[in-house]
Amino acid sequence: MSQSLMQSKQESTSSSALWAVAPGQAMRLSIGPGERELHLTEGRLWLTRAGTAEAPSEDIWLEAGDHLLLDSGSHWVAEGWGAARFQLLVPPCAATGLRFFLAGLVLRARSAASIARRAQGRISMGDSMASSGALQ
């Protein structure tokens, strides 16, 4: 069992993005923003959650077909027992929250753009009036 941590490797397929852990290798997983759902698609995976003063570390074993919800801000080490492949997905409830957040950003950006256009129009009108001699 190797204690070295490998660089994360992501493979893209036509239907999904898969992360791969080679036999006996490990990778760090830092979760966030928002929770993620880990779906093991192939092999066995040994997950260790980083411990804190309040909660000790925990070990979890997953086999192909298993899934686990990973909390936002949590830190894990994943080790493949045999070759392992998994997906890290945003759960639908988190995606809904993200959509509302992004929609709010879009509305604020549109509002700022509208204010900027109105201000630019006022500046242009003032320039026109000044250049025509109406303002003195």
Image (cartoon, rainbow, N blue to C red):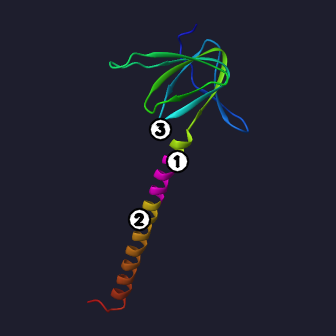
The stretch of residues the image draws in magenta is: 97-106
**Mark 1 / mark 3, whichever is N-terminal:** 3
The amino acid sitting under disc 3 is: Gly
Q: Position of residue 128 (x, y in %)?
A: 39, 86
- Image depth: mark 3 or mark 2 in front: 3
Q: Position of residue 109 (x, y in %)?
A: 44, 61
Find the distance from the CA under tag 3 to the CA under tag 2: 27 Å
Which residue is under mark 1?
A: 96
Find the distance from the CA under tag 1 to the CA under tag 3: 11 Å
Which residue is under mark 2?
A: 112
- The count of marks equals 3
Residue 136 on the magenta span:
no
Q: Nearer the viewer, residue 71 or 106?
A: 71
**Mark 3 / mark 2, whichever is N-terminal:** 3
The outermost residue toward the left is 136
Which residue is under mark 3?
A: 34
Classify 10 Å Cα crowding around label 3: few (below 14), some (14-19), many (20 and above). some
Find the distance from the CA under tag 1 to the CA under tag 2: 24 Å
The amino acid sitting under disc 1 is: Thr
Residue appearing at x 43%, y 20% in the figure: 50
Tell me the element at label 3.
loop
Residue 103 on the magenta span:
yes
Is residue 32 rendered to the left or right of residue 44? left
Tell me the element at label 1.
helix
